[in-house]
Amino acid sequence: TTTTTTTTTTTTPCVAAQVTTVDSSASGVGFSVDMAVSSVSGFPTMTYVESGVGVHVAVCHDDLCVSRTVVLLSLGNFAVSSSYSLGVAVSSAGNPRIAFCSSLLGSVGELALCGNTDCSSVTYQTLSNVGPNSAVQIALGAGDVPYIVHVANEQVRLDVCGDAACSTISNSVLLDSGVSIPSADVAVNPVTGLAEVAYGKGTGSAVTLYLARCSDAACSSFSTQALDTRSGVAVQYLSVRLRMTAAGEATVAAVLTGVTQVPSVVLVACSGTACASSSVVTLASSSTVGGAVGLGLDSAGLASVAYTDGSSAYLVSCGDAACSGSPAPVLLSASAKGLYVDLALDSRGQPLVAFQGSGATPDLLLYADCPGTTTTTTTTT
């Protein structure tokens, strides 16, 4: 007699969110929100701007972010000012790294290096190449060395730090010029270990979504590939997010808009590390779709995409790499202002979404934990 026991675990996508108010202020919080998950704790870290006050860092101590530490970053006696966009990454030790643009202190970029997981001690490095009103994002490579992409003065640049503290910039690479759309994102390919950058470039009558891939760690050379092109009057990508699958394949989410283009959330999924082919799908299209998008990929390379429509925040969970079948969006909250949103996946592989909300005070930073339902079935024969 042979006895066989089979255990099957099935996880269904999120159907209802649990929402936590992380911060609120009469002056307004939640501008330019960005989020990353610590590989040490498995919990998220958020960075965002409080209008007229400065950049905050919220370190969550649980999935719902009920327990958290909120720190206001400051430079000397000056609170940093509003950024057009800002980025956060978490080191292998669990310490946050925040890149942003300060219009104080000569309108330059700054990199905040938290000395511990709660960011109670911070040192700063000036990013002299980052100009005023820049869109800034950050990713960490081998040895936690930062890659910082910024868009300003119609240029997309990638700064490669010389060490983990970014005490020097080993290379500042001009990826493209004539770029009037201030949005880009950077990620490190887990297979090649090299940086890749996604950005949009318009001509007035058309816009193209590009992916630039570095050829070495210093990005001494790179190749650029067009992923998607749309025609229309004053068409542009308002927000671009780049994530990599475990197999080293790029996935890009973007918000597309224009005079003759209904605002839309677009997802581009590459096949192969060189993106020999790609699929393009529109996940949402409405006159009220907001100007930002959040993107995360699970261990199988399936995308979760967050967006807003002016009053509510939504989550789309893809069932395959191409996100085919028009998956229905899940309502996360009906209290979203529709301006800023980001998404990351926690250690469970579940989507976490941070977005700017509205409530009793003018602005709230709301955070939605949207776990799926996991069912385990054991069969004995």
Image: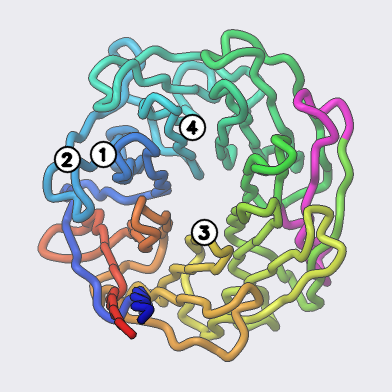
Q: Residues within 10 Å of mark 4 (few under 14, many from 20)?
A: many
Disc with the residue nearer the chain's start (4 vs 1) = 1
Residue 99 in the image: state x and y as whole percent. 49, 30
Q: Are marks 2 and 1 in contact (CB under 8 Å)?
A: yes
SS state under label 1: strand
Q: Looking at the picture, how far across and down is residue 261, in whole percent? A: 67, 81
Residue, disc 1 = 58
Q: Quadrant of residue 129?
A: top right
Q: Amino acid at mark 2?
A: Arg
User: Which of pointers 2 and 1 lies earlier in the amino acid sequence?
Assistant: 1
Of the residues shown, which amino acid type is indicated by label 3? Ser
Q: Which residues are magenta?
A: 199-221
Identity, as a three-letter code, of the amino acid under mark 1: Ala
Circle on res. 68: 2
Tag nearer the camera, 2 or 3: 3
Say whether disc 3 or disc 4 marks the residue closer to the N-terminus.
Answer: 4
Image coordinates for residue 40, horizontal then vertical, percent: 34, 34
Q: Earlier in the sequence, mark 2 or mark 3?
A: 2
Q: Nearer the viewer, residue 215 or 358?
A: 215
Q: Position of residue 347 (x, y in %)?
A: 36, 51
Which residue has dot 3 on it?
299
- How far apart marks 2 and 4 lie (CA) works out to 22 Å
* Image point (66%, 13%), residue name: 162
Spatial CA span between label 3 and label 4: 29 Å
Other residues around mark 2 within 10 Å, as few (<14) / some (14–19) / many (≥20): some
Q: Which residue is mark 4?
A: 100
| Distance CA(mark 4)–CA(mark 1) | 15 Å
SS at badge 4 = strand
Where, quadrant-wise, is the N terminus in this rendering? bottom left
- Residue at coordinates 65% horizontally, 61% vertically from top-left? 251
Asked whether disc 2 touches disc 4, contact meaning CB atoms under 8 Å apart, the reply is no
Q: Amino acid at mark 4?
A: Phe
